Image (cartoon, rainbow, N blue to C red):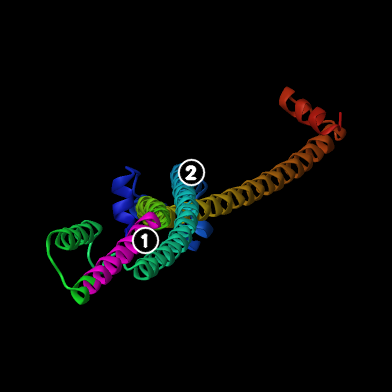
Amino acid sequence: MVTKEEVIEQYDIEAMDEADNVDLSEDDLDNGSKGQLIKRAGQLRDRRNELNQMASERASKRDDLNAKTREKVDEAQEHREKRDELNEQVQEHKDSRNELNAEANELFDEVEELKQDMELGSGKSIEELKEEIEDLEFRQQTEVLDAEDERELIEKIDEKREKLAEKKDKVDDTSELDDLVEEAEEVRSEASQHHQKVTELADKAQEHHNQMIEAYREADDIRDEADEMHELFVEAQEAADQHHEDFVRVQKRLRELDKEEEEERKDERAEKREEEKEEAEEIYQKFKEGETLDTEDLMKLQKTGLL
């Protein structure tokens, strides 16, 4: 299982140092001077921007990794489809091979039955029978035999001739056997060709299966990295959001302080106007009583509208 540290090192991204984060306590917010708060707002803004940039980079890396994961999954799916397609072809050739082997076995059984019927493997050969007949005929022609021996010899010659004729008839019928053997061998050869295709296609299917497994494994590894990168993104984004929230709080507090200062200035101006009015009334009373006013007094009267 990949770790965050490994992902940071592998993809050369900046690690987030919490020591660089800017803290804002309630005491800072409530009791800090305006100058201190302005400075803290700048620090919060700058750190927020850094963290947002960091989060953006991590999100981009995460999206790239998720895209690579999808590519690997698609690659695995392609190998799966090719494997399944090849396995279907393997099964088709297996079925054909088995059917042809069954047909060939039946034909070879017929060959054996026909051989047994013809008894080609039993008894004497045609040449042997011919030689025996010639020997018997030569004996008949050269030996002096009584009537009984002559008759027995003739019967033997006739018997041998019948066997020779039967043998010749069976040999003439072997064309049927040869055709049957040839057909059986052709069917067996065709079955062997299908078996060869089964082997070739099964090997290719296994290759695609292995490539599918490898692609899925790589997809899982990349997905793990993407998940860790997402956690790193969330870490940076949440810190950025906190800094933004604190920045907004400081800005709000600064506006409150500005408003308080403005109220104080308004009160001071009103108090000053009241004091000037009272002073002007005193000067005006002196003027009515006939006292001589200097230039400054006249300006104060004009300012308050009493002159």
Q: 249 or 155: which is nearer to us?
A: 155
Q: 296 or 80: which is nearer to us?
A: 80
Say whether marks 1 and 2 touch (CB < 8 Å). no
What secondary structure is marked by label 2? helix
**Residue 209 position within the rendered picture, expressed as x and y whole percent measured from the top left:** 39, 56
Q: Is residue 162 magenta?
A: yes
Q: 209 or 177: which is nearer to us?
A: 177
- Residue occupying the point 48% across, 42% down: 49
The C terminus - image quarter? top right
**Residue 296 position within the rendered picture, expressed as x and y whole percent measured from the top left:** 72, 26
Q: How far apart, in angstroms, are the residues tagged by discs 1 and 2?
A: 95 Å
Q: The residue under label 1 is which amino acid type?
A: Lys
Q: Which stretch appears magenta?
A: 151-174
| Camera-nearest label, 1 or 2 | 1
- Residue occupying the point 13% across, 66% down: 144
> Does residue 161 appear anywhere in the picture?
yes
**Residue 284 position within the rendered picture, expressed as x and y whole percent measured from the top left:** 83, 35
Farthest-out residue, top: 295
| Residue highlighted by disc 2 | 56
Q: Is residue 146 magenta?
A: no
Q: 33 or 204: which is nearer to us?
A: 204
- Residue occupying the point 85% across, 32% down: 305
The N terminus - image quarter? bottom left
Magenta residues, dominant SS class:
helix
Q: Determine the image quadrant of residue 304.
A: top right
| Residue highlighted by disc 1 | 170
Q: Determine the image quadrant of residue 158.
A: bottom left
What secondary structure is marked by label 1? helix
Mark 1 or mark 2: whose residue is earlier in sequence: 2
**Residue 190 position within the rendered picture, expressed as x and y whole percent measured from the top left:** 41, 52
